[in-house]
Image (cartoon, coloured by chain):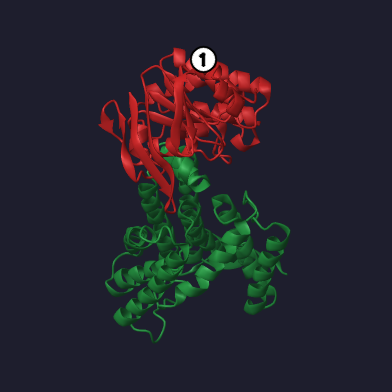
Chain colours: A red, B green
Amino acid sequence: MLEIKNLKVSYDKVEVLHGLSLNVNEGEVVALVGANGAGKSTTLRAVSGLVRADAGTITLDGRRIDGASAVDVTRAGIAHVPEGRRVFAEMSVKENLLVGAFQRSDKDGIARDLASVFERFPRLEERQIQMSGTLSGGEQQMLAIGRALMSDPSVVLMDEPTLGLAPLMCRQIVKIVRELNSQGKTIVLVEQNARMALSVADRAYVIEKGEISVTGTGQELLHNPDIKKAYLGIA
Amino acid sequence: MELATFVQTLANSLVLGSIYALVAIGLSLAFGVMRMANFAHGEFYMVGAYVVYALYALAGWPFYAAVAVAVPVVAVLGMLTERLIFRPTKSNTLAGFMATAGLAFILQVLAGQIWGVGLAKQVPMPIVGATEIFGALISTQRLTIIPIAFATLAALWVFLYRTKWGRGMRACSIDPDAAALQGIDIRKMSLLTMGLSGASAGLAGALMSPIYSVTPYMGHGVVLIAFIVVIIGGMASVEGAVAAAFIIGFVHTFGTTIWDGITATMLGVAFMAVILVIRPQGLFGQNPV
């Protein structure tokens, strides 16, 4: 469904992705794990059009989306839950969700999706008129996910959704990822918390210094001795 | 202060505050969405006044018809500024500042070349006479500015808080990257913002043309005040700009009535300095800069 081939991206002429290739099939949860600065977030940012690729191709259902703007990528059905949540702090919870549906014009569909986000996250419904900057980290993460869902995407890119959250909330996020996936969303999950990511992923890629070093199913990688040592903190 | 003087000063404060609010809100919207300070904003105000001068005082159109033309003319000027200056200099804030400062001079010289730089142009009052309120006689023409400005500010509020594009505009001003991820086209939004910014400055200039003298340099003083207002209110905060505009309107008018114009201006700047010390992000600003 989503296919990245030979992707090269640089920031200020310093190349950070050196020809990365990966693919995501429809209905999968694919995790990208790796150390800080390995290029996981950059990969997502390239997919959603926030950074330009120097070389390589990105296709969604066979159509090229590299070089497309963030607006076009959103319209094509990819939603991006950015690292650090990036909710619009001085806007209410409900407004944040409505902004998530910015490029849609089907009023009934928007109302239906708003109701389903509120059903999924009752906390957000209780706090819909509250400024989103006043929410807790976990609630903001739910809001960021809800906002992404408001564009009615087929693929959801999640960048570090558990970063800075309490363990209980992390488990909640895992549950949400599973739920979304079982409801038909394809998910690309970027995580430093490799254990969490691998346990929820169908397949995973380990990114090291801008390239894929290992790939396999989530379970395979969880039991791979090298991965255990490098990313799971088990000798 | 006698009641009549007080009422008169109060009315003048509201008029001045309304004009400051219309000018400052455009500056604040543009800064919010594009993080660009438009130094030609005062000249937008000046062009608005000249359109009324040309169509109403020279060509004999009805006053409000001239105002109705001034607004879209300056809106287009704002959109051209976005397209020709802000978009190409997006990655270089300083270049944007310098280019708009250059645009300010170009517009001043153009107005001077077309209509002359000598004596200030007099735009006759469309409504002659005064209205008596609590014994104070207040120019009716001045009073008409208050409802027009309030209606415009209310319309802007409804746009920003109750419409999809207004919410999108606020989202862009809070976090442009996150807004882009929601499918908001920042370029279109910047164009719209500069259109609104120009329209509100043009309206302010058009409304003020029969009251203050029209010269190519009339925007200079106004834009300085608008910057002060926007800094007091919080750079990207629309509510802040409106609140600060009325505060400065009151400070300037009451200061001038009680002491004199220079003292009033000093008080306004001193107020800004105090705000910058105790609340650097401005009255309604969110993030300390």
Q: Which quarter of the rendering shows the C terminus of chain B?
A: bottom right
Quarter where residue B107 is shown: bottom left
Q: Amino acid at mark 1?
A: Gln
Above/below status of A4 relative to B225: above
> What is the x, y in percent for residue A80?
45, 32
Q: Is residue B206 left or right of residue B143?
A: left
Q: Look at 39% across and 79% down and name the residue there.
A: B121
> What is the x, y in percent for residue B171?
49, 42
Above/below status of B183 relative to A115: below
Looking at this view, is A170 or B209 the one in front?
A: A170
Looking at this view, is A102 or A170 the one in front?
A: A170
Residue B158 visible within the image: no
In the displayed image of the protein, which residue is found farthest to the top?
Answer: A182
Read off the chain for label 1.
A
In the displayed image of the protein, which residue is found farthest to the bottom?
Answer: B118
> What is the x, y in percent for residue A118?
53, 20
> What is the x, y in percent for residue B129?
48, 69
Q: Tell me the residue that label 1 is attached to.
A: A219
